[in-house]
Image (spheres, grey):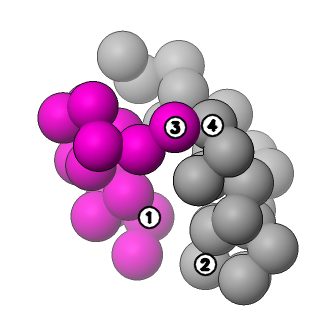
């Protein structure tokens, strides 16, 4: 799930709020969210 969310974020399809929801659902960790956001 991490790599799919990473690609979607890079494509501009996800916001930070959506990544927070992914954390809540247990799809990614807080550390992975930070990695995704820094990968721009």
Q: How many angstroms separate mark 4 from mark 1 (CA)?
A: 14 Å
Residue at image position (40%, 75%) is 1
Region of the chain picked out in magenta, as a range? 1-15
* Cβ atoms under marks 4 and 3 closer than 8 Å: yes
What secondary structure characterizes most of the magenta part? helix
Q: Mark 1 points at which residue?
A: 2
Q: Name the residue under label 4.
A: 16
Residue at image position (63%, 37%) is 16
Tell me where residue 9 sits by quadrant: top left
Closer to us: 36 or 17: 17
On residue 27, the disc is 2
> Mark 4, residues whose alpha carbon is within 10 Å: few (<14), some, or many (≥20)?
few
* Cβ atoms under marks 1 and 3 closer than 8 Å: no
Q: Nearer the viewer, mark 2 or mark 3?
A: 3
* Cβ atoms under marks 4 and 1 closer than 8 Å: no
Q: Nearer the viewer, mark 4 or mark 1?
A: 4
Q: Mark 3 points at which residue?
A: 15
**15 lies above or below 40:** below
Q: Earlier in the sequence, mark 2 or mark 4?
A: 4
Q: Is residue 27 magenta?
A: no
Q: Say left or right for 9 vs 25.
A: left
* Cβ atoms under marks 2 and 3 closer than 8 Å: no
Q: How many angstroms separate mark 2 from mark 3 (CA)?
A: 15 Å
């Amino acid at each position: 799930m991490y790599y799919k969310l990473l690609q979607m974020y890079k494509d501009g399809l996800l916001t930070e709020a959506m990544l927070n929801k992914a954390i809540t659902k247990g799809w990614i960790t807080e550390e992975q969210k930070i990695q995704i956001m820094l990968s721009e």
